[in-house]
Image: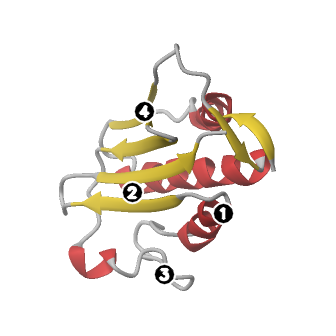
Amino acid sequence: SRRNNLIDIIKNAINLFKDTDNIQLNIHFDPDHDHMVMVDQKQLLRVFNNLIQNSIEAIGKEQDGIIDIRVKAEGDEFLVYVIDNGPGIPADQAEKIFSPSFTTKTSGMGLGLAMARSIIINSGGEITFESEKGNGAVFLIRLPRA
């Protein structure tokens, strides 16, 4: 891993999905920060691709989707929130969401999240999420600043 700009990586992921018809993708960050992290760029890109893809699939085609990605510097780490307005993840599935075999066949939600989690942990970070059924999902990634 080497020094990479977190914002550039997230923007690359957003660009891959920006033409999805019913989805609006936003990124919010403080331009005064340098946002450098020690990560494998390709691996981290896979994480964000995965989270965005999951959100898009959870939102579906029937409604307008909003996916907000917010980056905050806090102490010696960056917090990245990936927030969607999809149907959310029911509590009974929540504790299993990062396990390798987990998927909800209906939405594809959770596909690859075990991989995403191991990439983040290998980068010295952590990933958690909060969701209420019917109220969207929020993934939080913490990464150490370079």
Mark 1 and mark 2: Cα distance apart in space: 22 Å
Q: Earlier in the sequence, mark 4 or mark 2?
A: 2
Res. 102 mark? 3
Q: How is the image coloured?
A: secondary structure
Res. 119 mark? 1
Q: Amino acid at mark 4?
A: Lys
Q: Earlier in the sequence, mark 2 or mark 3?
A: 2
Q: Nearer the viewer, mark 1 or mark 4?
A: 4
Q: Earlier in the sequence, mark 3 or mark 1?
A: 3
Q: Earlier in the sequence, mark 3 or mark 4?
A: 4
- Vertical arrangement, residue 122 with respect to residue 30, above or below: below
Q: Quadrant of the C terminus?
A: top right
* Residue to which mark 2 is pinned: 58
Viewer-proximal residue, 128 or 23? 128
Mark 4 and mark 2: Cα distance apart in space: 25 Å
Q: Nearer the viewer, mark 3 or mark 4?
A: 4
- Vertical arrangement, residue 29 with respect to residue 140, above or below: above
Element assignment for label 4? strand
Q: Quadrant of residue 131?
A: bottom left
Q: Nearer the viewer, mark 2 or mark 3?
A: 3
* Residue to which mark 4 is pinned: 72
Mark 2 and mark 3: Cα distance apart in space: 15 Å
Mark 3 and mark 1: Cα distance apart in space: 17 Å
